[in-house]
Image (cartoon, grey):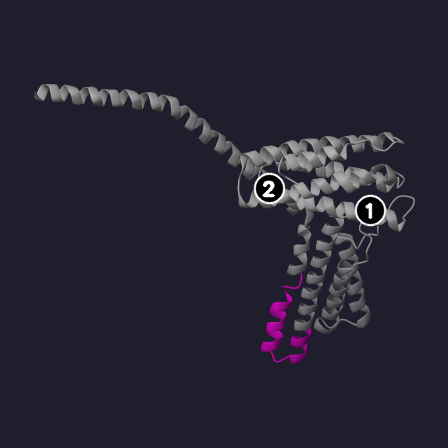
Amino acid sequence: MKNQTHQTLAKILESLAREAAKLAGRWLPRGAAELERQARQRAKDVQAYRQRRQEAAALAPRKARLLWLLPLPLIPATIIALASGQFTACMVNAGAYGLFLAGALLSGQGFQQEVEQRQQQFQTTGSWPFKTLGGLTVALATALTAWAGAGHSMAIALSFGGGAFAAFALLYGLEPRQRRIGHDNSQRVTEALQQAEQKILSIEQARGRINQPELNQRLGRIIVLGRDILGEIARDPRDLRRARKFLNTYLDGAQRVATGYAGAHANLRSQTLEANFRRVLITIEEVFGQQHQRLLDNDLHDLDVNMEVLEAQLKHEGLN
């Protein structure tokens, strides 16, 4: 009886072992492939993140750090003057140090403004010349240090200040001139380009919130094409009439679909939504390319695109 029980248990265990081996042979390769796919996806995400960081770092001039290092010798000079009872020299050194810091802050604001101007090529509204103000403040601090801190004459101190401003201008540059838009800098063309550029910037911001390399690349190509189209309109404002439907419909649709998907992507991951978004991006990229080519060819006819097709596709894909 015991032998039969042992044999029965052995058969059951053997059957379970065979089933387990079958299941392992069936699912382990899939699991390994899925783990490998996820690892590759993570590696691509990390690479895309590093690339975005490098692009952002490239916009900020690292040479600006010199402005924070320049006044450091004034700290021990202020302490020494205070310890030796030279109240006037202590106050002068402290004031000059504060001016240097103010110049660095103003220059930093100017550098940030310069980055924004690189991204917004068609904005013509006036802005404060922070970089020039920062250079003048650094020059004033240098002259004050040379005159009251080091004991030089007023003429020599002013020479030091002028040299500091010249060095600042050579190293960092000053505010660039405002760009004229084409031959006819009319208010109508300017406003159209500014509105279109804001839409492209919205797409660019939405792209930064989408952590999917393929979709990021497609959005990047759409952004480049959009900027190229605006550049063509800026060179020849007559192209505005031919591209008006594109600016008012397709660019607006691209902005809405990108910002909408970015918001949904941040809250949940849906394969269906991602596939729909990919199909819409393919359509938008094709139309952007066609419009750009038409402007390059200087076609006198408007681009005949079916706007209802995009609207219907956005509604059908759930991205409107």
In-front residue for pair 5/224:
5
Query: Where, by quadrant of the figure, is residue 243 drawn?
Result: top right
Q: Amino acid at mark 1?
A: Ala
Query: Where, by quadrant of the figure, is residue 52 drawn?
Result: top right
Mark 2 or mark 1, which is nearer the start of the sequence?
1
In-front residue for pair 281/306:
306
Residue 76: say if magenta. Answer: yes
Residue 180 at least partly seen: no
Give the x, y percent position of residue 193.
81, 46
Which residue is denoted by mark 1 in the rendering? 192
Left or right of 106, for residue 21: left
Query: Where, by quadrant of the figure, is residue 64 drawn?
Result: bottom right
Density class for disc 2 (Cα within 10 Å; few <14, some 14-19, many ≥20) is some
Find residue 266 and name its label: none
Q: Amino acid at mark 2?
A: Ile
Rendered residue at 75%/60% (across/down): 130
Rendered residue at 43%/25% (across/down): 30
Give the x, y percent position of residue 73.
63, 65
Which part of the image, by quadrant, shows the N terminus?
top left
Give the x, y percent position of residue 301.
88, 31
Which part of the image, by quadrant, shows the C terminus?
top right
Furthest toward the left, the residue is: 1
Left or right of 194, for residue 215: left
Which residue is denoted by mark 2 in the rendering? 210
Left or right of 47, for residue 202: right
Secondary element type, mark 2: loop
Bounds of the magenta segment: 70-92
